[in-house]
Amino acid sequence: MTEDAAQDWDPAYTEDGESILWSSDRGGTLQVWTARRDGSATRQISSHPSDAQNPGQLKGTDEFIYGSSGSRTWGVYRVSLDGSDDRLLYGGPIGVPYPSPDGRWIAVSGGNPSIRGLGSAHLVFVDAATGEVLPNAFLFEGLDRVTSAAMGRPRWIGDRQVAFLGHTRGLIGVMSMAFDPTQSAPGQPRPLAGFPAAANVESFDISPDGQRAVLSYERQIATVVIVDRLGALKAAQE
């Protein structure tokens, strides 16, 4: 699909399976691009002033959503597949938005300034038609260490269960909980997969039948080095 110096990531199929959406900075900033699955008809379809990432089509519509993490443009946006009618749907600090299989809801991860600690996050649910935020947000404490894992990163398992990156006993893995749009409180999360002792689960996805998961692990490495002629180096820096 791509072979260039740009950052190309966040791929997603369109509903008909004939085209791909993804984020690319080949034009200078991260925007949503699309192409046929054979790589033809490549074109940019978002023009956000900051960035546009993690696109996903809403089932039964000719529209898709994406997230922006710019400090002045935080939020989830909804836009037509031809790039027209780009509009803010939900405003707030976000990480990754992900539409439900039926296209009615969007699970949105993001940082919560009211919670202290690295990696603090929330998971909220947004009505894809109106942008209304449901009251059943899930908040969880952050880790006391740095990781590239986006806490709260969501994936759906059907229309009534959501999986997300979380942690228990200091280990990172995939949690799951029931989703009920009529309830004011979130479901009870439970460990689903991962939680390795010597690595972090950085990202994941769930198979369409909800029976399998694919996980990406990251491992942190600490290295000891010896620097000779430290005095000469210090003098050169001055």
Image (cartoon, rainbow, N blue to C red):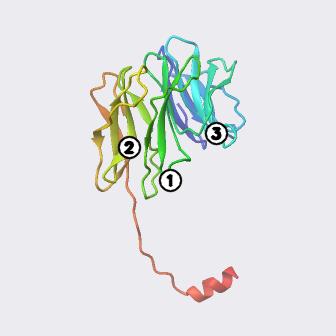
The circle on residue 25 is 3
User: Which sits in the foreground, 79 or 162?
Assistant: 162
Q: Residue 91: horizontal and vertical position, in percent?
A: 62, 32
Residue 163 in the image: above or below residue 83: below
Residue 205, located in which quarter of the rendered image? top left
The circle on residue 64 is none
Q: Earlier along the polypeptide chain: callout 2 or callout 1?
A: 1
For the residue marked with disc 1, what is the amino acid? Arg
- Residue, far right: 49
Mark 1 and mark 3 residues within 8 Å of each other at the beta carbon = no
Q: Residue 84: horizontal and vertical position, in percent?
A: 70, 18
Residue 55, located in which quarter of the rendered image? top right
Local packing at callout 3 (Cα closer than 10 Å; few below 14, some 14-19, many 20+) is some
User: Which sits in the foreground, 143 or 20?
Assistant: 143
- Residue at the spot 46% in from the left edge and 33% down from the top edge: 137
Which image quadrant: the C terminus?
Answer: bottom right
The circle on residue 116 is 1
- Residue at the spot 59% in from the left edge and 25% down from the top edge: 34
Residue 132 in the image: above or below residue 196: above
Q: Which residue is mark 2?
A: 166
For the residue marked with disc 3, what is the amino acid? Asp
- Residue at the spot 48% in from the left edge and 40% down from the top edge: 122
Q: Secondary structure at mark 3?
A: loop
How many callouts does the rendering have? 3
Mark 3 vs mark 2, foreground winner is 2
Q: Secondary structure at mark 2?
A: strand
For the residue marked with disc 2, what is the amino acid? Gly
Alpha-carbon distance for marks 1 and 3? 32 Å
